[in-house]
Amino acid sequence: MTYQVTVQPSGHQFTCEDDETVLAAAIRAGIGLPYGCKNGACGSCKGKVLEGAVGHKPHQERALSELEKTQGVSLFCCAVPQGDLVIEAREVGGSSDYPVRKMPTRIAGIRKAAPDVAIVTLQLPANEALAYRAGQYIEFLLKDGKRRAYSIGNAPSFEGPLELHIRHLPGGLFTDHVFGAMKERDILRFEGPLGTFFLREESSKPIVLLASGTGFAPVKALVEHLMHLKSERPVRLYWGGRRPQDLYMDELCRAWETTLPDFRYVPVVSDALPEDNWQGRTGFVHAAVMQDIPDLSGWQVYACGAPIMVDSARSDYSEKCGLPAEEFYADAFTSEADLA
């Protein structure tokens, strides 16, 4: 069966098969629904079902509670229609400007940036290029239909291999391979670009970039894109890690302070050991923003990293700092456990 989905308030319409999720059908039709992980863990694609009914595939409770379901809230990456639908969702302009493609790629390099972080570079086929927006991600297509998503760590203006920042999760199907058997010149396949985490260039508001761990990868791409645009928007980068070694490109961030006209970098460490001799900011990275900028009503925030950090920032900035909900853009990284 094929059902029709109408998006409000835009009035855009698309078709959805009875075994297809609403988000998958929207992406196929070029409709810009917001989304992040696509697997029911981050909550970025949450919206309302105004008319009709959906069933939900397995998802994380933190992304969509039973109470929210009773209120008509839906997680569109897991929602399968049971008839024609009218949904309410904030669409993202420009998210479908670049077609999603499946491409082969060759491993160009693997470099350890920290004991548990590898910078993996990907070489595309000759005369091929991937058109994407800074902040978007790709998904590796693995055996048995499994997928693993990683943000692109460099801006589209960069001429060279795509860069991924991959943290080792012991026991993880893919990351064990990256930190074990993977070698240069190996061939993989991926699909992309994906995601609606990218710079809203039409705005002139000052920007907070908030990252934890390897959530720094898409944030790095955003900074490089701002440099390419010769932007003069004020930018405050807050990068959090458990220990100083988790801030694996600290020197690069400090160099940006001399490159961008109104850029400040604030590293934050939560669990430094005595031997780290850490003298900088401590605690939760999202809380450091609140200490420095208690009024966020005139700002945009781009947050990427652990779901608990992203969720805490979303609620605290809105409730305590006056940040408009529509000015919070997020990409919550999910682990291989979330994808099982």
Image: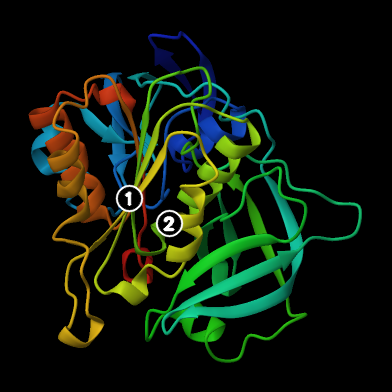
Residue 273 is drawn in which quadrant? bottom left
In the figure, residue 242 lies in which quadrant? bottom left
**Horizontal placement of 204 versus 338: left or right?**
right
Residue ID at (29%, 58%): 306
Q: Could you say where residue 116 lies in the image, as x and y percent from the top left?
A: 41, 81
Q: Residue at x 32, y 25 (%)?
A: 327
Residue 320 at what x, y percent from top left? 8, 31
Instruction: Kindly identify the amino acid type of the residue bearing the numbered disc 2.
Output: Phe
Judging by the rendered image, the residue that carries numbered circle 2 is 216
Find residue 226 and report its horizontal and vertical position in percent: 56, 36
- Local packing at callout 2 (Cα closer than 10 Å; few below 14, some 14-19, many 20+) is many
* Relative vertical location of residue 46 with respect to residue 249 in this rendering, above or below: above
Secondary structure of residue under mark 2: helix
Which residue is rendered at x = 24% and y = 82% of the image?
Answer: 276
Local secondary structure at mark 1: loop
Lower sequence index among marks 1 and 2? 1
Judge from the rendering whether residue 167 lies leftward or rightward of residue 301; answer left or right: right
- In the picture, measured across the screen, residue 182 lies left or right of residue 34, that is right
